[in-house]
Structure formats: structure tokens, C-alpha cells
Amino acid sequence: MRIIKAENFSLADTIGCGQTFSWIREGEGYINADVGQVVYVEQHGNKLHYETSDRNIDLRKLFRLDDPLLQIQDEIAKDKIMKESIAFAPGLRLVSDEFFPCLISFLLSIQSNIPRMHGCIHSLRQKYGPVYEFHEKTFYGFPSPAQLSVASAKDLKNLMFGWRSSFIVKTTASILSREVDPQELGKLDYAEAHRRLKALHGVGDKVADCVCLFSLGHLNAFPIDVWIEKVINQHYDIFKASGKTYSKRSLAAREYFGRYAGYAQEYLYNYARSRGGKLVL
């Protein structure tokens, strides 16, 4: 196995907090087959031990190990709830997932839950994705836009995707035709990338924010779901004067938490979900 140092990092918290669907539990570690090969990673103290089925891979990029985490935590720790959220999972970092798996996964997240999403994504991989052999086991990667383009809305409904099926079919077609180009999105600022993502069928504010944060690296993006809304409404005043629209609430959160608002969002989300949304001051 190859080894790299990973200071101020928890592999389990980073993968298990709900921000990524590309990593799955395997033995003592985790597998990712959505990066054009199979990657296996396990953590021992402040070191990551990993293997790949093909070429080497940049784990520092995938797990954002070069982000100045202590500085980030210091900047966003503006109140008691945030300090508690950070203390609950101090080694949690944001991920840098591949664009297409991230986009389709969060389209599947609309009015869904994490266990159901994992089931849907597993079915999608098995039906349309590439197949890899690794350590005498078979693993399925996330299909590319070209591989997924053979699926009709009816095919996806048979996988229990429901009304999300048409979103996925039309969005996949838009990516293939380069109506929205992932390479170009990566060069844009947050506001423009968010706007262009919303041109994709079924992509609203929250899905666009998730892709901006977990794939495109816009660390100021602040996705708002039911968990985040509950925490903010209970423990912060920033939504009360901002207005009820998603865009105004997201802006209020970004202005309050600053350039690392995305880290604040994930710490709050992870802490709230772990406690069933019941945070007590």
C-alpha cells in the first residue's frame, strides 16, 4: 500500500457525513470506483494507506487535505453551536468529488433520504457503469454521461427513480451536448457556476449549491436542506431579516460565515443530523 500523511483529518467523518456518495465501506476502509478505477483507502492515525487498481491518484485533492483546516475552523467558529459542531467532528473535511457522479447523486437526493439514495446509485452503477476487478472482487463505477445516455426515463423508473428519471435523462443529454460544460464550470466564480448549473433540467438552488461545494470547490457555497434550515431557524437570526427565498437565505448565511461558509454548513449538517436536529444551547 502507498502511504500519505493526513493531519487534522478523519476519513470516517468525512465520508460518513452525507456529502459524498462515491465512497462505500469496504473492510477496514472505503472504496471509490467513480474515478475511472478503484481506489481503496483506510486510515491509521494520521496516515492514509491506499491502493489503486490502475494509476496513482491524488488523495490530497480528493479529501482537500491541503485546506488550512484549523484556520477555517477558527474563522467560522463565531458562536456556541458552531463551536460544538466543529468539536463533534474536528477532522471532517469537504470532499472534491467527480462532477457527473456528484450532479446525478444530488438530483436523486431531491425529496429523498440517504439510505434510499445509496440504493438508487448502487442500481445505477450496476446497470450502466463500468466494471472493475480488484482484489478478486467486482466493483461498479458511476456511468459516464455517454454510458448513461442509453437509459430512457422508463428504464430509470424501473430502477425506482420515480419522477427524478426525466431530470436525469435530460440533464445527461445537456452535459453530452455541452450545453453545460463541466470544464468551463470549474473556471467560473461561484455565482456564475451556480447560475449555469440551474439551467440543467431539475437542478434547483440546493442541488446547484451541492455541486458547487462538493465538486467544483466553491467553499463559500451554502446548501440549505431541512436539517440546515431547522438549525438556522432555531439558533441563528440570520434568516429572520433576509427574506424567505432560498437565494436570500443562502446569501445571508454566506455573509455571516464568510468565505468558508461551505465548511460551516457541513459541520452544522453533520452535527444536526447526528442528533436528530435537536441541538440544545
Image (cartoon, rainbow, N blue to C red):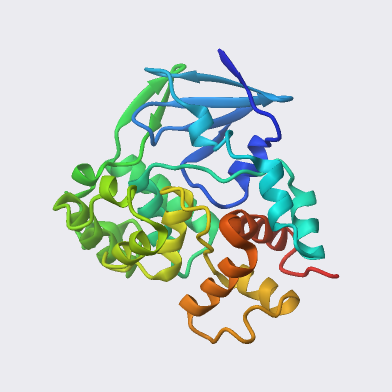
- Position in image of residue 25 (x %, y %): 57, 36
Query: Which residue of the protein is positioned furthest toward the top in this rendering?
Result: 1
Quarter holding the N terminus is: top right
Instruction: Identify which residue is drawn at 55% across, 38% down.
Output: 64
**Closer to us: 124 or 257:** 257
Considering only vertical position in the picture, is 134 above or below 255? above
- Position in image of residue 98 (x %, y %): 38, 42
- Position in image of residue 91 (x %, y %): 70, 40
Instruction: Identify which residue is drawn at 73% across, 78% down.
Output: 234
Residue 273 appears in which quarter of the rendering? bottom right
Considering only vertical position in the picture, is 48 above or below 265? above
Query: Which residue of the protein is positioned furthest toward the left in this rendering?
Result: 177
- Position in image of residue 196 (x %, y %): 29, 63
Considering only vertical position in the picture, is 248 above or below 31? below
Instruction: Identify which residue is drawn at 26% across, 49% down.
Output: 184
Considering only vertical position in the picture, is 212 above or below 112? above
Instruction: Identify which residue is drawn at 29% across, 42% down.
Output: 143
**Closer to us: 22 or 240:** 240
Residue 225 as seen in the image, left or right of residue 7: left
